[in-house]
Amino acid sequence: MGGHLVPRSARGSLPDIGDNYVTVITQWAGRSAEEVEQQVTIPIEIQMAGMPHMTFLRSESIFGLSFVS
């Protein structure tokens, strides 16, 4: 009976329980962690920080790799 009722429910009656995530992973082969941080990670962080409803920002820079989420 419950399976029959869910498809008949209006879409607006179901809450949006999913969070939205954005992850940017960038490779820059042969570059030090400091170069990746300055040239890639920080500019991406600045752009992502301006997104509406941003609640959490995490980043990491290692040799040749930037990770921002």
Image (cartoon, helix red, strand yellow):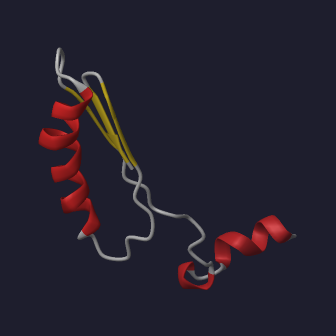
- Residue, x 19% and y 60% (percent of image)? 47
Q: Nearer the viewer, residue 58 or 69?
A: 58
- Most distant residue in the left direction: 39
- Residue, x 26% and y 60% (percent of image)? 48
* Image location of residue 3, percent across then percent down: 79, 65
- Most distant residue in the right direction: 1
- Most distant residue in the front direction: 34
Classify residue 11 as left or right of residue 26. Answer: right
* Image location of residue 39, percent across then percent down: 12, 40
* Image location of residue 50, percent across then percent down: 23, 70
Classify residue 1 as left or right of residue 32. Answer: right
Q: Nearer the viewer, residue 16 or 67?
A: 67
- Residue, x 38% and y 76% (percent of image)? 53
- Residue, x 21% and y 23% (percent of image)? 32
Task: Please determine whether, in this image, residue 32 is positioned above or below residue 5.
Answer: above
* Image location of residue 27, percent across then percent down: 23, 26
